Image: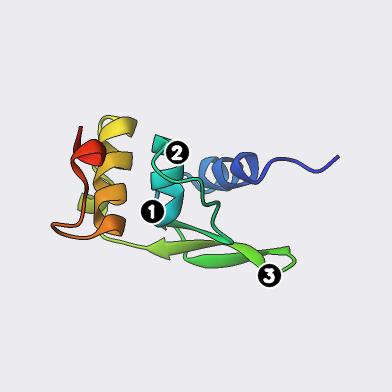
Amino acid sequence: MYPLWEDVVYAIAKRDKARIVPTGIYALNRLGHSTQVPMNFVFLTDGTPRRINTGKGKGILFKHTAPKKLAFRNEIVMLIVFALKEIGKDKATQEQLE
């Protein structure tokens, strides 16, 4: 049996002593505001940027970013910030904002 992709992502981050934060559709999905499951999972990291192919056109992308973009103390707040960035400025519905 294969490991869950999330386990792989967090194991890589732990091994590399890197911080990571999910972005885009995955953040929306984790908050329950989207039923879409992304083909490619994108994480911002202060570690080494890389792409991991998981087969059938799917993959995990680690994009390097400035440390200040990883300075969240609360995981929910972090997910909300990146989910709102994915939705776009002034495009969030009242339900999503609540």
As rendered, which of 76 and 38 lies closer to the eye?
Answer: 38
Residue 24 against residue 73 in the figure, above or below: below
Mark 1 or mark 2: whose residue is earlier in sequence: 1
As rendered, which of 42 and 27 lies closer to the eye?
Answer: 27
**Mark 1 falls on what kind of element?**
loop
Task: Name the residue beneath numbered marker 2.
Answer: 30
Mark 1 or mark 3: whose residue is earlier in sequence: 1
| Residue 83 image offset from top left, x and y in percent | 31, 48
Mark 2 or mark 3: whose residue is earlier in sequence: 2
Of badges 1 and 2, the one in the foreground is 2
**Mark 2 falls on what kind of element?**
helix
Q: Label 1 crowding class (10 Å Cα cut-off): few <14, some 14-19, many 20+?
A: many
At x 31%, y 31%, the residue is: 76
**What residue occupies the far front of the structure in this picture?**
94
At x 38%, y 64%, the residue is: 64
Task: Name the residue beneath numbered marker 3.
Answer: 57
Report how far apart the C-alphas of labels 1 and 2 lie in the structure.
10 Å
Q: Mark 3 is on which residue type?
A: Gly
As rendered, which of 6 and 16 lies closer to the eye?
Answer: 6
Task: Name the residue beneath numbered marker 1.
Answer: 23
Q: Label 2 crowding class (10 Å Cα cut-off): few <14, some 14-19, many 20+?
A: some
Q: Quadrant of residue 86?
A: bottom left
Q: Mark 2 is on which residue type?
A: Arg
| Residue 56 image offset from top left, x and y in percent | 74, 67
**Mark 3 falls on what kind of element?**
loop
Report how far apart the C-alphas of labels 2 and 3 lie in the structure.
21 Å
